[in-house]
Amino acid sequence: MPGMTAAQIIVIATPIFLLLIVGEFTLGRWRGRNTYRLADTLSSIGLGIISQLGGLFSTLLTVGIYTAAFETLAPWRLPADAAWVWIIGLLFYDFCYYWHHRAGHRVALLWAAHAVHHQSEDYNLGTALRQTGTGWLGGWVFYLPMALLGFPPLVFGVVALVDLLYQFWVHTQQIGRLGWFDRWFCSPSNHRVHHAVNDRYVDRNYGGILVLWDRLFGSFQDEIEAEPCVYGTRSPLRSWNPLWANAQVYADLMHDSWHTRRWADKVRVWFKPPGWRPADVAARLPKPAFDLQATAVYDPPLSRAAAGSAAGLFLALLGATAALLWQAHTLSLGTQLAGAAAIVAGLWAVGAISSPRAVQRSEQPA
């Protein structure tokens, strides 16, 4: 949309996302296969809000780096008014995204950011909105080849948004196998596999739009009807706190880096695959091995009073977020920071209301 910021486009798209979530919830209830829990859904969408708020401040850095590389290092500049540039740009972006996504599962530092998207133990359209607030720390590196090959920043920005929006609809259990479509594209079936922690499924199907990349580079896994997907992460979050959701894996890495005695391991822990631990730390401070059968879904009881309070506060924060994102380009940096901080504090409160201790207090007799 000409003249609109990316944040404003997200604001316009949000009611569509929410209507589709309501539609999926209604369909699931009608089929007797509901995939939603209130606290989890509020947590997921709240983390999406934090991601968008972070984008107000990080986009300038990431787009700035891309633009600087394009203007100073690209040997040529592709025309932004040519259709083939946009088509090739989208395909090339999706190729870069595949490697970014794959690295996000194989490099601990990148996983620390990406893990947020996988923490939900439900799988639904709300999960699609569950995004990291720290992905900007290293993700921009994977798209520099586009700048070096002369794709204009406008093309990069638009195809990145298209790639992201495409991935919304594949986060559902209400759509089954799609035949030939599953062979070429990221589909609900293929992406369910990606979110699963089963041994057969873990770290598979990284493609954003095309699953073709997974077939070419050996990371494809078909969904097996006899082995239902189990969702979440192998180190469960077990919290509705959005700040801890973003910090959990970083804290674990910092813990192991601090406690290992070998200096090489203090660095290595950040770049090894997720789950790797220095031998001395693993021996002194062991963690239980992952057991799919013993994993229980985090589902503390939520009273009607707590549910109503959390939902009411969340709706108010959603409206405040829409107003801030829509007006952000007209506001000073200080006002943006203050508004974002207030919303994040409110989302922390939503998580606190939904948490066991708050639930227990709300159920005590007056």
Image: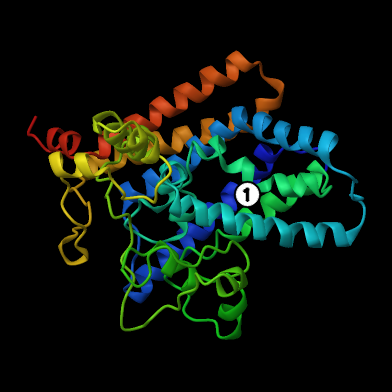
Label 1 CA crowd tier, 10 Å (few <14, some 14–19, many 20+): few
Name the residue that disc number 1 marks.
13
Residue that appears at 21% across and 46% down: 302
Which residue type carries mark 1?
Ala
Image quarter in which the C terminus is found: top left
Left or right: residue 189 compared with residue 323? left
Question: With respect to residue 64, does 239 lie above or below?
Answer: below
Depth check: 195 or 353 in front?
195
Depth check: 261 or 39 in front?
261
Depth check: 349 or 154 in front?
154
Left or right: residue 67 compared with residue 232? right
| Quarter of the view holding residue 204 | bottom left
Where does residue 295 sit, x and y in percent of width and height? 19, 59
Residue that appears at 17% across and 40% down: 356
Question: With respect to residue 69, does 185 lie above or below?
Answer: below
Where does residue 350 sit, x and y in percent of width and height? 33, 35
Left or right: residue 325 compared with residue 310? right
Left or right: residue 337 compared with residue 308? right
Look at the image and tell me whether residue 142 can be seen: yes
Depth check: 169 or 133 in front?
133
Look at the image and tell me whether residue 326 can be seen: no
- State the SS at label 1: helix
Where does residue 218 sit, x and y in percent of width and height? 52, 72
Residue that appears at 57% across and 52% down: 100
| Quarter of the view holding residue 90 | bottom right
